[in-house]
Image (cartoon, rainbow, N blue to C red):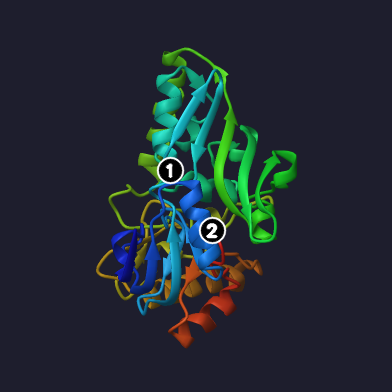
């Protein structure tokens, strides 16, 4: 399926974004590869849960993997396509008595993006349970990488270094009782409800990465970020490392607020926070300049 001049704000978790010139929605690996071969410069995205798309849109091509949502279970091995939501995968594993994905409960993103950035929460990361990943390389086609070959690090994988796209991920889980699994999931949900904004509030999750040995949220709160706002965007009152689209915020509002937050921490502690959220847009020079100042990654191939 292909759509032209697609209003991407319908899909982003920030509920922000203008029109994308052309968007594809493949439903299988074969269809995805065929599209990417015909559109080699396309940006690849999943649920756009960790991406700020410019309100001025993007004059390019986007391939959205959200309809690639197949899940296979073979014993304690669970294989999920790139577009599968983390929450869905976590619940299905639990329903089959398999433990290891409880940390993904209430994750807004998809498997492709979560593997790409080695997503984590509650002391766990994707790298703890991933056995292998099927990826697409523009030069070599479809490849299978082991956990070691993925070169996982904090919020990073080999896909940040190379133009690779996650197609599928295979997770090796451990059998456990439904009661034990559900208890851990409930604890994780309670933590998120008490400390983080509901998924019904437009946000993109954590805005900045934690600096080594410290917490971005702690630094931001100590620097007074909880009182900050810009246009229709504001910092979440319960956790200073979250931005809420509170009143029809634009991408510029969010970038300006991110700059205020980052500058406050740098001025107080001399620490430069690096954004976890990424940016997609090429029609607004002021926004591109703000991204450079923030050292914010422009989306290239997947999330």
Please state which of residues 16 and 195 is positioned toward the viewer in this rendering: 16
Instruction: Using the rendered view, name the quadrant where residue 189 is placed.
Output: top left
Q: Nearer the viewer, residue 158 or 207?
A: 158
For mark 2, what is the residue? 302
In this rendering, does residue 119 appear at all? no
- Between tags 1 and 2, which lies in front? 2
Taking 99 as reference, is 188 left or right? Answer: left
Which residue is the extreme one toward the left?
Answer: 247
Sequence-wise first label, 1 or 2: 1
* Residue under the image location 40 percent in, 71 percent down: 254
Q: Position of residue 167 (x, y in %)?
A: 54, 47
Residue to which mark 1 is pinned: 107
Quarter of the image for the N terminus: give it. bottom left
Residue at mark 1 to residue at mark 2: CA–CA distance: 17 Å
Q: Residue lying furthest bottom in this view?
A: 285
Disc 2 on helix, strand or loop? loop
Crowding around mark 2 (Cα neighbors within 10 Å: few <14, some 14 to 19, many 20+) is many
């Amino acid at each position: 399926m292909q759509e032209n001049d697609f209003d991407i704000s319908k899909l982003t978790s920030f509920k922000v974004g203008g029109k994308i010139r052309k968007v594809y929605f493949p439903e299988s690996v074969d269809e995805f590869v065929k599209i990417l071969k015909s559109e080699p410069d396309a940006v690849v995205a999943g649920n756009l849960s960790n991406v700020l798309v410019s309100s001025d849109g993007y004059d390019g091509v986007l391939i959205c993997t959200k309809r690639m949502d197949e899940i296979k279970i073979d014993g304690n091995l669970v294989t999920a396509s790139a577009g599968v939501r983390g929450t869905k995968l976590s619940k299905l594993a639990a329903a089959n008595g398999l433990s290891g994905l409880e940390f993904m409960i209430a994750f807004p993103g998809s498997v492709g993006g979560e593997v790409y950035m080695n997503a984590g929460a509650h002391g766990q990361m994707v790298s703890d349970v991933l056995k292998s990943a099927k990826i697409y390389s523009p030069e070599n086609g479809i490849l299978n990488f082991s956990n070691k070959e993925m070169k996982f690090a904090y919020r990073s994988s080999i896909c940040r270094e190379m133009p690779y796209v996650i197609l599928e991920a295979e997770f090796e889980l451990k059998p456990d009782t439904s009661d034990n699994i559900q208890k851990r999931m409930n604890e994780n949900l309670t933590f998120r409800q008490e400390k983080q904004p509901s998924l019904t509030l437009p946000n993109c999750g954590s805005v900045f990465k934690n600096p080594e040995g410290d917490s971005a949220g702690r630094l931001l709160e100590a620097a007074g970020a909880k009182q900050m706002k810009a246009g229709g965007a504001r910092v979440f009152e319960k956790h200073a490392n979250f931005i809420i689209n509170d009143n029809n915020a634009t991408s510029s509002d969010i970038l300006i607020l991110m700059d205020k937050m980052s500058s406050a921490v740098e001025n107080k502690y001399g620490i430069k926070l690096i954004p976890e959220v990424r940016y997609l847009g090429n029609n607004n020079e002021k926004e591109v300049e703000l991204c450079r100042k923030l050292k914010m990654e422009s989306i290239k191939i997947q999330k």
